[in-house]
Image: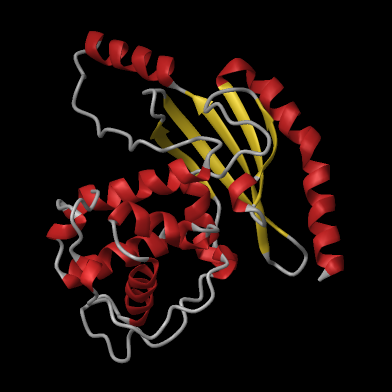
């Protein structure tokens, strides 16, 4: 284990000057971020440029959490377009880092602000009479605070459900927890407590929903759901407990969307 950590650290150190070189090549519209996924809450170990406002010691974005959730099966995500909370259009590539065993432990991310390019493209298309509707790029939460990323993912899942937590039936509550799990939320330390607080339910209930969501196949068949462990990796959460989700706080007063 020590030799693997040493190898991973060497790779990160070797890539640090590359971060500055790429950013300098593409100028002020480019930002390059180097991530160490062994510490999700402060994954940024090097950054050059300022497109998303990241700083060293900051947290990964929801994109990084999605890669983290896929583990060693993660693949590079190249040339995808997203939008910052401030409305800037960003073209990005996320390239996963692996050690000699194939284990994913980080990522090198390149973000290019294409807001002005998009505006000029729209103007030229209008002049050429070829203007048409374009799909709106999704908004991605970038920030140094992992809690804000978890909150944004939870808010997005609730919007997709079209209900507050209190308005969801059991099947849709499991879908909510399954969706959060698939996007890597519960790989983050203390995320289960944060989600429980936001939903206005107990920590035990949150563990139970997570355990059942992992035990189902997405069609509503549970089997022995709710009796195993949550298996939340680095979340530092221990076991899920053996209780069922049907607790008194399933429909709490003042539950937050």
Instruction: Report x, y in % for residue 126.
Output: 23, 12
Q: 74 or 247: which is nearer to us?
A: 247
Q: Is residue 232 left or right of residue 222?
A: right
Instruction: Report x, y in % for residue 244.
Output: 29, 82
Residue at 55% across / 64% down in the picture? 235
Residue 185 visible, this angle:
no
Residue 139 vs 242, above or below: the answer is above
Extreme bottom residue here? 224
Residue at 47% across / 62% down in the picture? 186
Instruction: Report x, y in % for residue 30.
Output: 59, 24
Q: 174 or 52: which is nearer to us?
A: 174
Residue 226 vs 138, above or below: the answer is below
Residue at 83% across / 43% down in the picture? 14
Q: Is residue 73 left or right of residue 133?
A: right
Instruction: Report x, y in % for residue 73.
Output: 55, 67
Residue 167 vs 207, above or below: the answer is above
Total numbered circles: 0
| Scheme of colours in the image | secondary structure
Residue 86 vs 183, above or below: the answer is above
Q: Is residue 60 left or right of residue 66?
A: right
Residue 213 visible, this angle:
yes
Quadrant position of the N terminus in the picture:
bottom right
Which quadrant would residue 193 be assigned to in this image?
bottom left
Extreme top residue here? 127
Residue at 72% across / 33% down in the picture? 19
């Amino acid at each position: 284990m020590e030799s693997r950590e040493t190898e991973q650290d060497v790779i990160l150190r070797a890539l640090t000057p590359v971060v500055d070189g790429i950013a300098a090549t593409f100028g002020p519209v480019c930002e390059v971020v180097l991530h160490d996924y062994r510490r999700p809450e402060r994954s940024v170990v090097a950054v050059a440029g300022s497109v998303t406002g990241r700083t060293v010691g900051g947290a990964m974005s929801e994109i990084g959490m999605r890669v983290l959730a896929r583990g060693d099966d993660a693949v590079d995500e190249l040339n995808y377009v997203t939008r910052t909370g401030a409305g800037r259009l960003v073209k990005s590539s996320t390239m996963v880092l692996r050690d000699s065993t194939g284990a994913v432990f980080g990522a090198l991310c390149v973000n290019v602000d294409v807001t002005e390019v998009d505006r000029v493209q729209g103007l030229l298309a209008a002049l050429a009479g070829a203007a048409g509707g374009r799909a709106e790029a999704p908004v991605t939460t970038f920030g140094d605070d992992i809690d804000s990323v978890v909150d944004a993912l939870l808010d997005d899942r609730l919007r997709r459900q079209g209900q507050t937590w209190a308005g969801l039936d059991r099947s849709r509550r499991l879908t909510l927890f399954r969706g959060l799990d698939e996007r890597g939320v519960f790989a983050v330390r203390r995320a289960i407590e944060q989600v429980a607080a936001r939903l206005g339910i107990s920590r035990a209930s949150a563990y139970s929903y997570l355990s059942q969501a992992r035990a189902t196949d997405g069609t509503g068949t549970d089997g022995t759901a709710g009796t195993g462990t949550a298996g939340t990796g680095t979340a530092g959460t221990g076991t899920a407990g053996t209780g069922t989700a049907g607790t008194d706080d399933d429909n709490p007063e003042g539950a937050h969307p």
